[in-house]
Image (cartoon, rainbow, N blue to C red):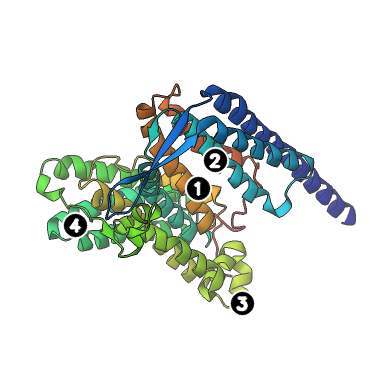
Amino acid sequence: MASATVNLKDEQVAVNYTRQRVMGIVFLTLAAVLWFVFAQGVEPDAITKFGLPASTQLGDNIDWELMSRSTLIPLALITAVLGGVQLARGFGQYTNLVLAIVVLLFIFGFLVWGASGKSLNLGGLLGAMIVRSVPITLAAMSGILSERAGIVNIAIEGMMLLGAMAGALVGSLTESLWIGLFGAVAAGALLAAAHGALSIRYRINQIVSGTVLLIFATGFTSFIDAKFLQEYQELNNPGTFKSWEIPVLSQIPVIGPILFNNNLFVYAMFLSVPLLHFMFYYTKWGLRVRSVGEHPKAADTLGINVIRTRWISVLCSGGMAGLAGAYFTLGSVPRFDEGLTAGRGFIGLAAMIFGNWNPIGSFGAGLLFGFSDALQTKLAILRLPIPSEFLLMLPYVATMVVLAGLVGKGQMPAADGEPYEKE
């Protein structure tokens, strides 16, 4: 036993050392790109101009001008120093924080290089990033609610589709956006109830259950759309929630118009992340949910109702997915079309894994996906010699890198996907 323990420790040390070297090489590679491709690829006297919003009241942009090469060189040097330290001895528990800093430096360097000699509306880009990250982040929150209790929910995409359709249909019939929103949340929870019955009550394989419900939701919403919503347009015109300025906060230069002049769904995203983080890590309910997802038998021994806890978590997950789906028809485009969610539910699951099943980390991953989605629309304006499809690949590549263990092994709940039967 002692020999096995020593071997496991030696193996873990070897894995950590390998990861340290790989990350150091990655940092140095990014520094080389910043220096040789970006810094040397701009004219010595080129200027990069970023447009930032002054305030919602003024409605004008503040021009932020930078000398392109003089900005890129320090970015390359800082990244190279961080890479050298990482390669030599690592940053210990701060490794992931340093990785985030390096990624931000590289992205900023890319923007400086791409907008060199031009003007880029950085405020518009950041605003689009926030908006496009909403359904992804809410889907990630839905996944966390379910998987923290030990139930894998790959039917989030289907719940979002059903929620989007229900939001459009109910909102149109009642001529009330709020009732439509309630209908979307209820539709997501209804499909989650079916998932709970199959995976909790009858202990069917959770992947199979989620796949079946996803196929059902895709086919059902496509049928309703083709048979009714496309033919009777009055059933598919719910309207959308308008943007609402938060007094005082929306007048803050730069960040005010970006963060505090949005619609209901953006504020719901901002609220859900800290709320779920607090509930999971600072309340008895969160402790019970996490214990059920980690060791249900031990939780049952301590008097926690495992079945009831899982049911509540799955239903909450479905409601959150329905809210994410409602974003498309009540917060973005006021109509439902076949396949409207376009895989955002699966991207939300990737963001959940990227964020290590943590609300704050998943929010950061959602912003990364949203940024890439928003940035690829700007390439046509900047006329960069990079295909827009390449940028769409980046979040997925980053996710695969994370799953491969570059930033540490993901700590998924130990009992995730395992059915529980009370003895």
Where residue 31 appears, as percent x and y from the top left, is: 64, 33
Residue holding disc 1:
365
Q: Secondary structure at mark 3?
A: loop
* Image: 200 above or below 391: below
In three-dimensional space, the C-alpha distance between marks 4 and 1, rounded to whole angstroms, equals: 32 Å
Q: Amino acid at mark 3?
A: Leu
Q: Residues within 10 Å of mark 2 (few under 14, many from 20)?
A: some
Residue 170 got which mark?
Answer: 4
Q: Is residue 197 visible?
A: no
Q: Nearer the viewer, mark 2 or mark 1?
A: 1
* Image: 208 above or below 360: above
Q: Residues within 10 Å of mark 4 (few under 14, many from 20)?
A: many
Residue holding disc 3:
302
User: At 60% from the left edge and 28% from the top edge, which residue is drawn?
Assistant: 33
Could you tell which of marks 2 and 1 lies nearer the N-terminus?
1
Q: Residues within 10 Å of mark 1 (few under 14, many from 20)?
A: many
Where residue 318 appears, as percent x and y from the top left, is: 38, 58
Q: Which one is nearer the viewer's eye here, 8 or 220?
A: 8
Could you tell which of marks 3 and 2 lies nearer the N-terminus?
3
Where residue 98 appears, as percent x and y from the top left, is: 64, 47
Q: Amino acid at mark 2?
A: Thr
In three-dimensional space, the C-alpha distance between marks 2 and 1, rounded to whole angstroms, equals: 9 Å
In three-dimensional space, the C-alpha distance between marks 3 and 1, rounded to whole angstroms, equals: 35 Å
Q: Which one is nearer the viewer's eye here, 267 or 341?
A: 267
Residue holding disc 2:
399
